[in-house]
């Protein structure tokens, strides 16, 4: 495997891009981009690229889930 390919795989395993959120959350492209443009959503911008660290996304999702369950009780 070429160095660029291995670096790309390593980066991809640690981050999502907005299109990755679509099947994970069951949302469309516009909704995914609206979500990543919210200040409360964890993103890293590299030039024009929008990256979502997986760990930060999982923490954000957990916090959203906890909030939803605590409001029901």
Image (cartoon, rainbow, N blue to C red):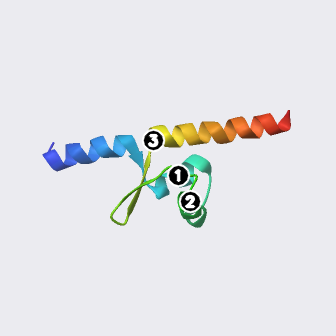
The residue that mark 1 highlights is: 21
The residue that mark 3 highlights is: 54
- At x 86% / y 32%, what residue is drawn? 73
Q: Report the Cα–Cα distance between label 2 and label 1.
A: 6 Å
Numbered label attached to residue 32: 2
- At x 37% / y 41%, what residue is drawn? 14
Please tell me how crowded label 1 is: few (under 14), some (14-19), or many (20+) other residues with Cα within 10 Å. many
Residue 12 left/right relative to 71: left
Residue 32 pos. (x, y %)? 56, 59
Helix, strand or loop at mark 1:
helix
Q: Quadrant of residue 50?
A: bottom left
Helix, strand or loop at mark 2:
helix
Residue 59 pos. (x, y %)? 55, 37
Q: In the rendered structure, are the residues bearing label 2 and label 1 in contact, judged by CB atoms less than 8 Å apart?
A: yes
Comes first in the chain, label 1 or label 3:
1
Residue 34 pos. (x, y %)? 58, 64
- At x 60% / y 41%, what residue is drawn? 61
């Amino acid at each position: 495997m070429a160095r660029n390919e291995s670096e790309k795989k390593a980066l991809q395993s640690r981050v999502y891009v907005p299109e990755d959120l679509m099947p994970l959350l069951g949302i469309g492209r516009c909704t995914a981009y609206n979500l990543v443009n919210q200040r409360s959503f964890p993103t890293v911008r590299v030039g024009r690229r929008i990256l979502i660290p997986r760990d930060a996304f999982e923490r954000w999702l957990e916090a959203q889930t906890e909030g939803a369950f605590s409001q029901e009780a």
